[in-house]
Amino acid sequence: MQPYKPGMQPSEVQKKFNLDRIVKLASNENPYGYSKRVTEELKTMATDFEMYPDGYASELRNKIASTLNVSEEQLVFGAGSDEIITFICRAFLSEGTNTVMAAPTFPQYRQHALIEGAELKEVPTVQGHHDLKGMLEAIDNQTKIVWLCMPDNPTGTVIPEKDFHMFMEHCPKDVIVVLDEAYQEFMNTKNQYDLKQNLSAYENLIVLRTFSKIYGLAGFRAGYGISSEQIATKLNIVRGPFNMSIPTQRVALAAFDDEQFVKETKEKNANVRFEFESFLQKIGWTYYPSVTNFLLVNTPIDADEAAAFLLKNGFIVRSGNLLGYPQTLRITIGLKDDMQQLQQVILKLKDSIQDGVIG
Ligand code: PMP
């Protein structure tokens, strides 16, 4: 196993290549920042840090529970949904158990399952989609958890809700299904799953949500899980008592309240993504059909080389070689102007390719 290898920080790249400006499109962060209500909340935050935070995150819990129409006891909070993934693995996996997931997909499921000593049953994706039938077939008596990343990272593809129901109806009830919805707010509302109905129908379901993506609070580390009270209790046993800091609880509450910011981000992202997709179509580059704030783009040359070219020209993107999709780049959808500049750099890259390499 290896520690997580982060991409280069913008300041490092700027220094290395002597550039005026760097645009980071590598971690699917929100280029529009975060709600003004968060800015206001931050201004009021100069006291009380000698005290531990509210370990129950009462205000945030109350707000989210009432908005989602679930009970407070159905929620568990973490330092990002990453931390909830660690709770789930710690609570349900150990040597002698196994866990089923797509491959490739978001790598933290694999990482924490291995840390707990569980066996991995990785089912190859088909054209960037989870192979749900293959995943059902992989389940056996030792399977404790199945992971569904919806929309998927790094492809941005969806599992249609009827396929999800088919999966849940065939999945044994004693196997936990984790539905990671980190990017669900970017989807068309009509394609989003019905959370309340699914939680009522499937007692073995855990849904993961995050404040890092559409809410633009990746730097604060806030995420949550929603499940039956029974499962949430197990996760809360594993959770450290003060795992969500005072500032994080407060900004998450402020951000969650601002539906307008979420709506605007979603609309702007969809428009800019659409524009970028049209550009790629025009130059004959293909990509996976994404409903998120990133695109996995097929490159005519090695992905590391393509990423290095973009880096030298001021754009940090993620090489698909690191994500299990060689010869692709995962590109976060940034601001309109930045994406237009990126188009120019991609054209320059395209022009410099000769016989499958940069000439
Ligand atoms: N799930 C998916 C699919 C993700 O892409 C990410 C972030 N890249 C996470 C979970 C974790 O996000 P966070 O810990 O910031 O909530």
Image: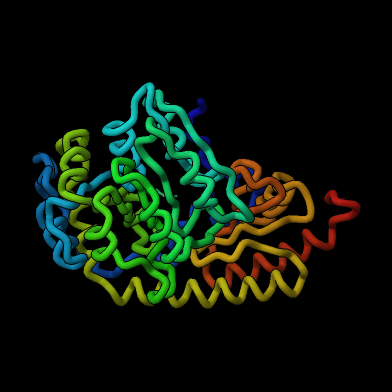
Using the rendered view, name the quadrant where residue 267 is placed.
Answer: bottom left
Residue pictured at 41% horizontal, 45% vertical: 147
Q: Residue at x 11, y 40 (%)?
A: 52
Asked if residue 105 is positioned above or below residue 310 in the image, the reply reads above
Q: Residue most toward the right?
A: 355
Residue 11: percent from left, percent from top? 53, 47
Which residue is painted at 69% across and 45% down in the image?
326
**Residue 1 on image: x %, y %:** 51, 25
126 relative position to 230: left or right: right
Observer-nearest of 297 and 21: 297
Instruction: Give the side of residue 243 with respect to residue 118, left or right.
Output: left
How was this image coloured?
rainbow
Residue 154 locus on image (x, y percent): 54, 52
Q: Give the image quarter of residue 289.
A: bottom right
Residue sitting at x 47%, y 42%:
101
Q: Judge whether 117 appears above or below 245 on screen.
A: above
Whether residue 11 appears in this view of the structure is no
Give how far across and how far down residue 30 sits, in percent: 43, 62
Say if 27 sits above or below 142 in the image.
Answer: below
User: Of residues 277 and 196, which is closer to you in this image?
Assistant: 196
